Structures are given as C-alpha cells and as structure tokens.
Amino acid sequence: MALLQGRQAWLVFALFACGYFMSYALRSVNAVIAPELVAQFGLSNAQLGAMSSAYFLAFALMQLPLGICLDRFGSRRTDSMLLLVSACGCAAFALATSPLALWIGRALIGAGVCGGLMSALKGYRYWYAAERQTQLAAWMLVVGTSGALAVTVPVEKLLPLVGWRGVFIGAALLLVATSAGLWFGVPRDEERALAPRPAGQPIWSGYGEVFREPYFWRWGLASVTMQSIFSAMQTLWAGPWFTQVLGMTPSDAAGALFVFNAVLLGGFLGLGWIAPRLERHRITLVQVVVIGSIVYLGLQVAIALIHQPGAWLLWLPLGVVSTCYTLVQTHVAMTFPPALTGRAFTGFNLLTFSGMFLCQWLFGVALDGFRRVLGSELEAFRATLLVFVVIQALALVLLLVWRVGPSSRAPAR
C-alpha cells in the first residue's frame, strides 16, 4: 500500500468530494423547489414526501450491491459509473410530466449517487493513514453540507431564470463531468490490490458477518432514528416548516435554509478539528453521542412548541449537535477487518437510508393525518415532530442499556 502525498493526495480527495457534493445537493434541493412542484403537479404532503423520499429508497436498496462492487471493483470504477446513472435520473426528472415520472427520476438520482460517500471512505482507507480516517470523513461531510448550502439561496435565485427543470439539466452535466474526473484522475493501485473472491464463495458473502455483529446493531438502530429525522427535515420538511409554521415567504425560507446549512457546515468543520483530539483525551463515542443527543432532543421539543418567526434560530444549534452521529459510521466500520470495510460501510448505510426514506415519507403521511384530526397545519407539524422525538428518545435509551462491545477481530477506533 502506497499512501498518497502532496498534490495527488489533495486531488484524490477533491475528486471524490465533488461526487459527494452533488449527492448532497441533489438530496437537499427539494426543500427549495417543493413549492414549485406542489403548484405544478398538485401534490399532497404525503405525495411530496413519497416522491422526495424515492431518493432515499433507491439509495438504501443499492447499498448491498454497492458494498460488493466496492470490494470487488474498487472505488474509482464503482463511483464513476454510478454517477452516470444519477445524471440520467436528473435528465428524467427535468423532463417529467407526471408525479410518477418525478418519482422515477428521483429514484434514479438516489441510485446513482449511492456511492458518493462510501466510495470515498473505502478508497481513503487504502490511500491515507489510519489516524486520518475520522478527519477525512468529517471533511467529506463539510463538502456534502456545502452541496446542501449551494441549493438554498443560489437555486432560489436561479428558479426565475431557468426554472427547476433547468436546474436539473445543469446537475446532469455536472455529474457527467465529475464521473469523467474520477475515471481519469484517480489512481488504479487500489483496484490491483483487491483480493479476488474465493471460488465457490457466494457473492453476498461477508454481509452475514456484518449483520450478525451485535455492536453493529447497537449503533445502527440509534443512528437510524437520530439521523433519519434530521435528514428528512433538512432535505425536505424544513422548507415547509419555515413557510407553513413560521409564516416565512419562500424567499425568506430559502435564506433561513442557507444560514442553517452554513452553520451545519461549520459544525462539520469543527468536528474535523475536534475528532482526533477527543481520541487523544480518551473521550468515548458514547459520551459524545449521549450528551449531544440530549441537547438535540431538547431542541426538537423547543422547535415543536415555539412557533414565532424568530424560532427558526433554534434550527442553528440543532444542526451543530446533529453532527455528533456522523462519527458513528466510521467508528463501527473500522471494527471490521479491511476485507469487509466496504460491506460494513454500506450495510450501515442501508439501515440509515432506509430510515431516511421512511421518515421523509411518513412525516408527510403523519402531517396529513394529524391535519384531518386537529384541523390545523401548525398543530399537525407540531404533533408529527413530537411523535418522532419520542421514537428518538427510545432509541437513545436502547443505546445506553444495550452495553455490548465490538468483537476482537479488529481494534475499534
């Protein structure tokens, strides 16, 4: 294994980061264009949630095949090919004339960007030193949040000029360019070092070992509930919350989303700085997550109960404390042997993005249900969020009482 140095190290990071930037931007863009889609296609909250969450459903379904491809074909080939699928999805979304066509385009987008982060983390484990892994993961999340930032005010300003269809045509072109950069710019030595699959071994071999690991499930279940509701809000429902609960105009809501994602980006920057220092001071991941989760749940309760216009400021610390769970995936994956890294990352992603799909869709379903019962859009939003707070609190309790540790196959990091 030859660790990358200097310019080449930065180039490889930047190329994979571009793919993840597009992944996160496309994940988040519906929070801004939702009013346009609702107006043009007459979508209900449940339909909007189902259409937007098609990204997460396809993303989740691709995780097990993705892990196999990463371990057999390498990061470069896998990610560059998948990004072309996402480009086709953007084109299909841009040309859609019905809710079903929107759903299909959105699903293709999610399937194609499913390797944005996992491909990078798999490659980084080969090209960069072990002590850099947590920091690199945090930097990638900074890049991803920059993608979410780029689709707030900038996209809201572009809509009168090119429309939401033009935005997706532009995204398709950027994805093609990113795919080409990965294919031609990333070294091939990782692919030459891949271990061949033993003769007669089933293609799904390895996932059984991952999914039989109790430590994987201890953290996986907690991560699913905490990250899923945050992602559902960040990438879709925060926009309607600002307009329908807090009474903001679409322009003001886009500005608030911009600030929210800018603060979230700052949180990831801080995470990249503090993560290695936490390890040196022997502060455990459980301690970080428990403290962060208590603050996180308290802020959600405050958001649900306070609905004055200035209440959008509560979302800023919420974004900061939400970053504590981003340390979990790398921590869990690094407890598995190198040959199972791809499967460990993508198995964890399968849980997380399945949860994101369910939360984004069910949030809309619950909204419509509570609105019929309570007769108020504001009360429906409030009741829905409080239900999700209870679910997250139960997951935190499970994390604390289920005290299983990692197996001794590989040192936990």
Image (cartoon, rainbow, N blue to C red):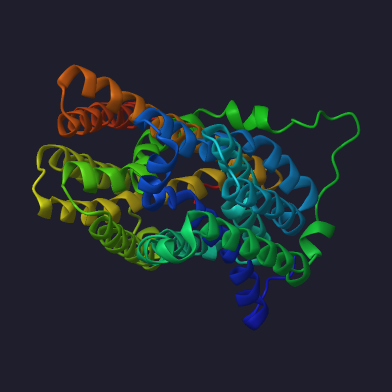
333 and 323: which is toward the camera: 323
Above/below status of 212 relative to 274: above
The reply to whether residue 284 is in sight is no
Q: Quadrant of residue 366?
A: top left
Q: Residue furthest right?
A: 199
Q: Is residue 264 left or right of residue 124?
A: left
Relative height, residue 136 to residue 92 (above, below): below
Q: Extreme top residue here?
A: 373
- Residue 380 place in picture, x, y as percent: 20, 28
User: Residue at the spot x=53%, y=36% of the render?
Assistant: 54
Q: Quarter of the image holding residue 62?
A: top right
- x 84%, y 40%: residue: 197
Determine the residue located farthest toward the bottom in the rendered image.
Answer: 7
The part of the image, by quadrant, that contains residue 339 is top right
Q: Position of residue 268 (x, y in %)?
A: 38, 61
> Is 310 left, or right, of 343 in this rendering?
left
Q: Quadrant of the N terminus?
A: bottom right
Asked if one can make out residue 124 in the rendered structure from this viewpoint, the answer is yes
